Image: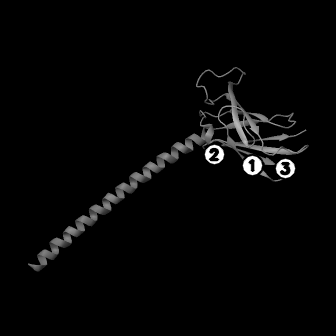
Amino acid sequence: METIIVSVVSMALIIISTLTVTISTLQSANRMADAWKTMETRSSSIGQTEIRITAPTDYTGGLINLTVANEGHTNLSDFTDWDVILQYQSGNSAYLAYAPGGAPAPGQWAMLGIRVADGSPEVFDPGILNPGEVMTVSINPATEVPQDQMARMTVATPNGITSQGYVTRK
């Protein structure tokens, strides 16, 4: 009798532990599949995003107005999540905060407008940089670019795609 009770308890423990391991394995596989799906979505977004900066060639000080062209296949928005970094020839650098709507204060950047590649204003999806459109960006450096020195501007989208442009103050 005693061996039957021990056997039943042992069998119950084996069944419970097998079920627990099976359920844990299935949950882990689900989490892995979800992570894989998220990674694929992000990778696809990165692969379809491309921007190009065109910096002014006649910069004499003050605001730096440059253009950012969307040459990829992804609509770009959420400008508050974009990063703009200004690096000086001296080695100093500054992260510029986004200024929504209007002229940027010192140490900020702002989106002045979006237009279609031929120069006409955008009419479809206002406020979204669609493929083939060009955005005008105004940068207000907290520290002026010194005379006859170069500065590098780096613009990064929320998914990590970057482009750089250079300006030399005359």
Q: Which of the image's four quarters has the C terminus?
A: top right
Q: Which of the image's four quarters has the N terminus?
A: bottom left
Q: Amino acid at mark 3?
A: Gln
Q: Is residue 155 left or right of residue 47?
A: right
Q: Nearer the viewer, mark 1 or mark 3?
A: 1
Residue position marked by numbered label 3 in the rendering: 89
Give the CA separation, mark 1 to mark 2: 18 Å
- Position of 56 relative to 13 (above/below): above
**SS for dot 1:** strand
Q: Amino acid at mark 2?
A: Gly
Q: Which one is nearer the viewer's eye here, 4 or 169?
A: 169
Residue position marked by numbered label 1 in the rendering: 94
Q: Nearer the viewer, mark 1 or mark 2?
A: 1
Q: Residue 80: percent from the left, percent from the top?
A: 62, 40
Q: Residue 10: percent from the left, percent from the top?
A: 20, 72
Q: Residue at x 60, y 25 (%)?
A: 126
Counting other residues with Cα less than 10 Å from the Cα at mark 1, is it few (<14), some (14-19), or many (20 or more)?
A: some
Give the CA separation, mark 3 to mark 2: 24 Å
Residue position marked by numbered label 2 in the rendering: 160
Q: Nearer the viewer, mark 3 or mark 2?
A: 3
Answer with the quarter of the image where residue 19 lies.
bottom left
Q: Is residue 15 left or right of residue 73?
A: left
Instruction: Give whichever of discs 1 and 2 has the lower sequence position.
Output: 1
Whether residues under marks 1 and 2 lie with C-beta atoms below 8 angstroms apart, the answer is: no
Q: Is residue 39 left or right of residue 111?
A: left
Instruction: Give whichever of discs 1 and 3 has the lower sequence position.
Output: 3
**SS for dot 2:** loop
Instruction: Give whichever of discs 3 and 2 has the lower sequence position.
Output: 3
